[in-house]
Image: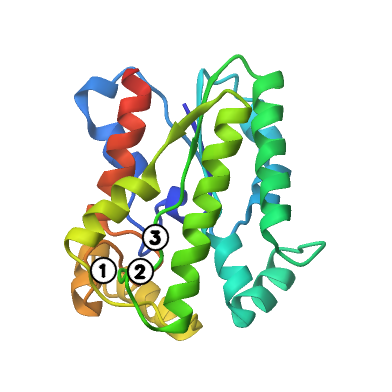
Amino acid sequence: MACLGSSTTAGKGQAADWIGELKRRPRNKGISFLNFGVGGDLAYNALQRLPAALSCHTTKVVVLIGGNDVLALVSKTARRFFRIAKHLPTEPSPEWFRENLRAIAQRLKTEVPAAIALCSLSPIGEDPASADAFQRELNQRIEEYSASIREIAREESVGYLPVYERMLAQIVAAPGRAFTSFRFFPFYRDAFRVSVLRKTPDEVARLNGWHFHTDGVHLNSRGGMIVADLVQEFIDG
């Protein structure tokens, strides 16, 4: 099984390892999980890396990509960083995201004999009713991009895993902090906490006051378990 995505899929540093959770489950003993998650990737980057996943002759593929596309759209700081660090050929936009994700789905369909599932996006921040302008736009864009993912999955006749819907329902039941700006220092600080101080993502989440995230963007084990359980349903189906 190949898992294609960004840092949420990579499961390194302050991001919970939901693929590791699936590996540990006895029911998945005979499955080889291949992690094609790269931190910071947008859908465009995942499309460029697709040949590596295609070459594995996998029987199942899960695609979870788009959170960085949203951050690049909403935050000027994130957009400048991604344009340089990820060598983006154009300005991020909803249309460009859909174009790249559709290309991923179509290539997977035609080039590998695999069951394919596209995941909607995990929320960024934990305040769905926030009056903060930055969090409010994130909420709107995550919903918009997740609807696009659902539409592409339907049009391309591939599976759809409702990560956004499942996680949002739990956040609405227990809302938390708003994610009010994109800044590098908190991410570097939390990476230091994990890599040097040897704290777990859940310990970092508690220090930062998040319920489902470690830092408002990356998932802790509670958020990662939602993804793992949905992928498990796809595996079992």
Q: Residue at x 40, y 56 (%)?
A: 12
Q: Is residue 38 visible?
A: no
Q: Which mark is residue 123?
A: 3
Q: Residue at x 27, y 77 (%)?
A: 177
Answer yes or no: do the residues labelled 1 and 2 have beta carbons within 8 Å?
yes
Work out whether 129 lies above or below 212: below
Compute the Cα span from label 3 to label 2: 25 Å
Depth check, front residue: 115 or 86: 115
Provide residue 214's location: percent of width, then percent of height.
30, 68
> In the rendered structure, which disc, 3 or 2, sits on the residue that comes first in sequence?
3
Provide residue 24's location: percent of width, then percent of height.
24, 34
**Left of 58 or right of it: where is 80?**
right
* SS at badge 1: loop
From the image, tell me which residue sits under label 1.
198
Q: Is residue 203 visible?
A: yes
Q: Which residue extends farthest top? A: 113
Provide residue 219's location: percent of width, then percent of height.
33, 59
Q: Which mark is residue 195?
A: 2
> Three-letter amino acid code at disc 1?
Arg
Compute the Cα span from label 1 to label 2: 6 Å
Answer yes or no: do the residues labelled 3 and 2 have beta carbons within 8 Å?
no
Work out whether 36 lies above or below 141: above
